[in-house]
Image: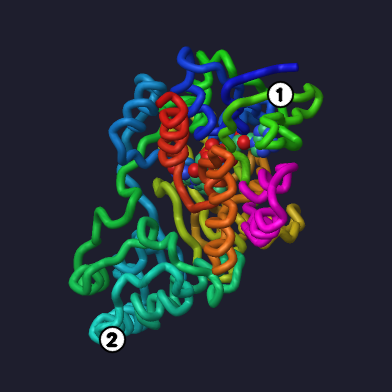
């Protein structure tokens, strides 16, 4: 029977960062069920192409995590200025839509600007408390035009959940809020640069985003691949690992999806199990395509209109040439579902039709490689049930001195750097 001080469930970025901080200081075991580290930040190789689980770009904000990430990548990292766009009404306009309406037809521009000014002048366009629903919030803050032409259709496609029930705690860091003069200038004058969290990003020069978890994993003595934690008992300090047997631990750090984690907890009270059963998420299917004969230099685009089955499409070779052989581009195209399973053959035909319709590929372009990747739990749903369930679950975990961290362990809309930060913080608590 194996004994460890700290059992870490999951070798994605959160688990790897925690392990890195514990290395040489405390005995630990990372149980990662896949045969590779990295979780969603892994990169897969198919033919001569490297494909990520959709675009995974590094937005670095904090000194300690930046140092760890950039240090792990060594010189294998580029700093890139974002070129993101929106395609609507047969036109391209720069991201974010609300501050860059210049590319839209005159009618759309005027509906958006007049709606925004009406909302602003109502004196009721303040930030809100997060519990407000998305459909109400966007109309109140951005007005009817921007809501109707972008915010509502785009977010309906992304979240796959009724926007009358989606709450808005996630919006502040992710939805840029321009001032009235920026909306007007963006519609009738200059391009508004620098709005939003991702105006500049970092990305490995070679090997895709998987270069980061691979670098973090390199010297970890306690990382074990192919180990799935099937169940555990926090009171007894025992986890059952598939094909391996029991592992005794003193402390547990979880990074697997919170709903599944609680379902595996043998000693969780019924109220905690009921709370976890109320959590919801969407599922994302990513179609990666290797294409010959592509001219665009855009990094990624947002597609609010229903005629496109995808909500976002990007060209990874425009920020890292080495992901594809010379003369080829590498696309990632994201389709969200509420858990229903799409027919991949017809989805692929619709994607290719959509890429042609917006001009990203030509009829003469040649698809030379393809890889579908499924992200079963992609975006956690923010709703009243989540707001009620999380305090119940985390109060129990705290009483058992267990940590649940990372994008899915903490059940939130967060980014790679935040997972790394939470891993470092969880380890620091144990080392205190
Ligand atoms: C479509 C999409 C696009 C994104 N784009 C970006 C972006 O551009 N920039 C950015 O910063 N972030 C992006 N993210 C977010 C980013 O992927 C995550 O924040 C980060 O990778 C999460 O790391 P993690 O370690 O918290 O979780 P994960 O990567 O999910 O790691 C959890 C690990 O636990 C393992 N596991 C699960 N259950 C068990 C079990 N029972 N036993 C053992 N192991 C288990 C899994 O195999 C996995 O390796 C995106 C996410 C999505 C869905």
In this rendering, would 181 be left or right of 420? left
On screen, residue 8 versus residue 23, left or right, reads right
User: Can residue 51 be seen in this snapshot?
Assistant: no
Identify the residue at image location x=65%, y=31%. 46
Q: In what element is the residue under mark 1?
A: strand
Closest to the observer, 258 or 331: 258
Q: Does residue 133 sit above or below 56 in this rendering?
A: below
The CB of the residue at mark 2 lies under 8 Å from ligand 1: no
Inspect the magenta stretch and tell me whether residue 294 lies in it: no
**Tag 1 residue:** 247
**Residues in magenta?**
258-284
Residue shown at the point (39%, 57%) measured from the top left: 174
Q: Is residue 316 left or right of residue 84?
A: right
**Which quadrant of the frame does ligand 1 lie within?**
top right
Q: Secondary structure at mark 2?
A: helix
- Left or right side of 296 for 292: right
What quarter of the picture does the N terminus occupy? Answer: top right
């Amino acid at each position: 029977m194996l004994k460890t001080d700290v059992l870490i469930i999951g070798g994605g970025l959160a688990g790897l960062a925690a392990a890195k901080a514990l290395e040489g200081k405390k005995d630990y075991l990372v149980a990662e069920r896949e045969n590779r580290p990295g979780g969603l930040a892994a990169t897969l190789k198919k033919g001569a192409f490297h494909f990520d689980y959709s675009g995974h770009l590094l937005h670095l904000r904090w000194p300690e995590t930046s140092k760890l990430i950039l240090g792990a990548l060594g010189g294998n990292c580029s700093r890139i200025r974002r070129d993101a766009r929106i395609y609507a009404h047969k036109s391209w306009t720069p991201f974010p839509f609300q501050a860059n309406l210049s590319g839209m037809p005159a009618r759309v521009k005027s509906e958006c600007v007049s709606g925004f000014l009406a909302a602003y002048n109502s004196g009721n366009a303040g930030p809100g408390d997060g519990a407000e629903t998305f459909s109400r919030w966007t109309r109140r803050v951005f007005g009817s035009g921007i809501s109707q032409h972008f915010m509502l259709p785009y977010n309906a496609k992304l979240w796959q959940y009724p926007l009358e029930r989606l709450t808005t705690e996630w919006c502040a860091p992710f939805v840029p809020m321009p001032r009235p003069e920026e909306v007007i200038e963006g519609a009738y004058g200059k391009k508004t640069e620098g709005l939003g969290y991702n105006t500049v990003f970092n990305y490995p020069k070679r090997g895709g985003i998987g270069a980061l978890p691979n670098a973090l994993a390199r010297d970890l003595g306690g990382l074990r691949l192919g180990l799935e934690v099937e169940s555990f008992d926090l009171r007894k300090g025992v986890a059952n690992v598939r094909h391996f047997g029991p592992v005794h631990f003193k402390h547990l750090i979880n990074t697997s999806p919170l709903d599944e984690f609680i379902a595996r907890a043998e000693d969780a009270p019924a109220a905690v199990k009921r709370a976890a059963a109320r959590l919801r998420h969407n599922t994302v299917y990513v179609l990666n395509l290797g294409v010959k004969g592509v001219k665009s230099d855009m990094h990624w685009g947002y597609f609010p209109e229903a005629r496109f089955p995808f909500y976002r499409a990007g060209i990874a070779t425009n920020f890292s040439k080495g992901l594809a052989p010379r003369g080829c581009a590498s696309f990632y195209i994201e389709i969200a579902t509420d858990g229903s399973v799409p027919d991949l053959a017809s989805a692929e035909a619709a994607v290719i039709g959509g890429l042609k319709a917006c001009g990203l590929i030509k009829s003469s372009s040649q698809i030379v490689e393809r890889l579908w990747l499924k992200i079963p739990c992609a975006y956690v749903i923010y709703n009243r049930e989540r707001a009620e369930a999380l305090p119940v679950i985390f109060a129990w975990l705290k009483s058992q001195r267990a940590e649940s961290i990372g994008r899915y362990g903490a059940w939130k809309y967060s980014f790679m750097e935040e997972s790394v930060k939470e891993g470092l913080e969880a380890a620091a608590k144990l080392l205190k």
